[in-house]
Image (cartoon, coloured by chain):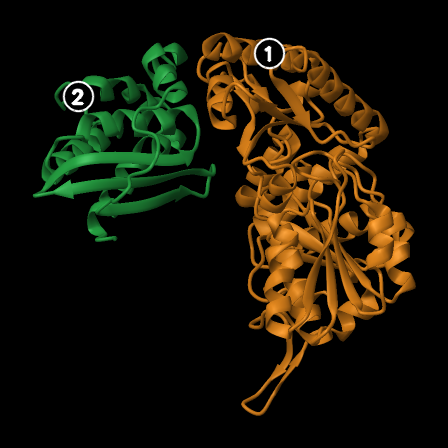
Chain colours: A green, B orange
């Protein structure tokens, strides 16, 4: 059912994204672009002692990528970078078909995207941006 | 019923009736093309132009027959002027490299319309960089038509090539290419027309158009994928060096030098896509049996009905309002992104394309990133329109 994918939680996050904006002094940042559909996201992080203290994003994209980014930022704020990376890995595994994975909370709303493989990149875009950002040591 | 000729239309999509509205990306294949493909591999498969045996002779004769049939279909003076390629993209690259690299120099100008597909844009951009020529945009109006006055003003003696699409793949505009070709010729420029979208909908007569180069796609005219053709005027093709070299395109080879074969072989090195080119003839035969004027009118009518009904829905508008348009409708909804709309349509069995349609400069012209595009073909009916409208209404309910 398409309504399983475009449920209220997703539409709310797409319409009123959390942590949209920019940080005054980010420690890490990255830009991700999906040339297939034009979705783009710029992610900024403030990491202190291995903990993501603050996070913000800007960009444009479809409801799925916007909601996925919004949900990701709410879930990883306050987590260590290692915990955030691990969560991203679980999420990527789950939406590419590994049904054994535990309940992932709000991320579960995005799991029905697995029926539409061409849209999976929309949901994983922010997580790719996160990995890129954590590899960067920007000013 | 025409739809009965296209078995794929009987197969449900996500459990729903398939409303195939992505004909600008590729058309479905009639039973005759499917049969010809199977028949070729079952009974006719051999390499062409080289076997000393009966089967190869037969395959060669059939292969050459497609060339003759295609040449007749577009009214080329000779079948030597029809070069087989793997598609429009390769046809245009052939001209950009072989003609462009040898005829362009510093200070020359290539005019490229704002509505070109990347296939008729990027090759010219790359050649212009290599040769120090400049690439200049032919602007389009807000309706999505070529600005002919601006085009006239751009035509100076420095213009050596004009690259123009016959029918826009993203907004459906049918360009006045005959007039534009005549205008270009007055200043001595050559014209490369991208005909990818045209052949399934319009009767193309290359001699009447006076076109120098015309790129053709097989799979967008109900034929197999992986086959296309370049039409070029004989005197131009004769003067051009080979694009790629290798077997089949030579006359003699020695360590000292290689001499090249005559047209069309000069531009066809290696084993061609024989299993695609032979069945392509069946697609041309299929089109020969249609009244294309009626087909084009019917497709344009379905597109107009879709446009009218869909614009009744709040927040929807259609990009590209040219007076002469093929059956292509590019949709924008201010309440959702093109990809979300595309996915919801998909869940209702409606196959459309979403994105920039390989026309990023055109998208930028309209300050948009992506559209949801419905494009019509010969088998589409009002049922497809109704299914599409209902699916857009459903999306509207979901997004509110």
For the point 17% across and 21% down, the residue is A104
Location of residue A129 in the rendering, given as x and y in whole percent from the top left corner = 29, 41
Q: Nearer the viewer, residue B254 or B161?
A: B161
The residue singled out by tag 1 in the image is B387
Disc 1/disc 2 C-alpha distance (Å): 36 Å
Circle 2 sits in a helix, a strand or a loop, which is it?
Answer: loop
* Res B73 label: none
Q: Chain of mark 1?
A: B
The residue singled out by tag 2 in the image is A104
Circle 1 sits in a helix, a strand or a loop, which is it?
Answer: helix
* Whether residue A18 can be seen here: yes
Q: Is residue A135 above or below residue A48?
A: below
Q: Is residue A138 above or below residue A75?
A: below
CB atoms of marks 1 and 2 within 8 Å: no
Classify residue B140 as left or right of residue A90: right
Classify residue B72 as left or right of residue A12: right
Quadrant holding the N terminus of chain A: top left
């Amino acid at each position: 059912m398409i309504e399983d994918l475009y449920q209220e939680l997703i539409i709310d996050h797409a319409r009123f994204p959390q942590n949209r904006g920019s940080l005054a002094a980010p420690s890490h940042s990255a830009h991700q672009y999906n040339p297939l559909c034009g979705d783009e996201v710029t992610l900024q992080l403030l990491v202190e002692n291995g903990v993501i203290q603050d996070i913000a994003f800007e960009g444009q994209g479809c409801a799925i990528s916007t909601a996925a980014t919004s949900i990701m930022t709410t879930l990883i704020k306050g987590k260590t970078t290692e915990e955030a990376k691990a969560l991203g890995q679980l999420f990527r595994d789950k939406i590419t078909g590994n049904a054994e994975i535990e309940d992932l909370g709000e991320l579960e709303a995005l799991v029905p995207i697995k029926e539409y493989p061409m849209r999976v990149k929309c949901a994983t875009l922010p997580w790719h941006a996160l990995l890129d950002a954590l590899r960067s040591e920007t000013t | 019923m025409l739809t009965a000729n296209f078995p794929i239309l009987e197969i449900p999509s996500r459990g729903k009736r398939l409303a195939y509205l992505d004909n600008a990306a590729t058309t479905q294949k009639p039973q005759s093309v499917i049969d010809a493909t199977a028949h070729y591999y079952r009974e006719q498969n051999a390499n062409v132009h080289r076997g000393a045996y009966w089967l190869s002779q037969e395959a060669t004769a059939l292969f050459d027959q497609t060339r003759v049939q295609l040449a007749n279909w577009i009214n080329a003076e000779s079948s030597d002027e029809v070069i087989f390629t793997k598609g429009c993209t390769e046809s245009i690259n052939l001209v950009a490299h072989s003609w462009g690299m040898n005829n362009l120099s510093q200070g020359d100008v290539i005019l490229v319309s704002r509505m070109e597909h990347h296939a008729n844009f990027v090759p010219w951009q790359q050649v212009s960089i290599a040769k120090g020529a400049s690439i200049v945009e032919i602007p389009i109006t807000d309706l999505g038509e070529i600005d002919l006055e601006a085009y006239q003003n751009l035509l100076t003696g420095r213009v050596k090539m004009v690259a123009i699409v016959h029918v826009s793949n993203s907004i459906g505009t049918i360009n006045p290419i005959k007039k534009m070709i005549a205008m270009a010729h007055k200043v001595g420029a050559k014209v490369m027309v991208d005909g990818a979208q045209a052949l399934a909908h319009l009767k193309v007569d290359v001699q009447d158009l006076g076109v120098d180069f015309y790129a053709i796609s097989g799979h967008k005219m109900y034929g197999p994928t992986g086959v296309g053709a370049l039409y070029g005027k004989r005197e131009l093709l004769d003067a051009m060096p080979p694009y790629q070299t290798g077997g089949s395109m030579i006359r003699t080879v020695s360590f000292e030098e290689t001499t090249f074969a005559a047209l069309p072989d000069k531009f066809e090195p290696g084993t061609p896509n024989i299993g695609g080119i032979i069945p392509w003839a069946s697609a041309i035969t299929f089109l020969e049996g249609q009244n294309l004027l009626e087909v084009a009118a019917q497709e344009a009518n379905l597109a107009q009905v879709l446009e009218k009904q869909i614009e009744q829905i709040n927040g929807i508008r259609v990009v590209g309002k040219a007076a002469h348009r093929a059956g292509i409708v590019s949709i924008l909804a201010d309440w959702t992104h093109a990809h979300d709309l595309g996915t919801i349509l998909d869940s209702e069995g409606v196959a459309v394309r979403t994105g920039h349609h390989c026309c990023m400069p055109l998208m930028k012209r309209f300050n948009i990133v992506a559209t949801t595009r419905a494009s019509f073909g010969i088998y589409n009916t009002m049922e497809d329109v109704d299914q599409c409208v209902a699916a857009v209404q459903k999306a509207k309910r979901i997004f509110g």
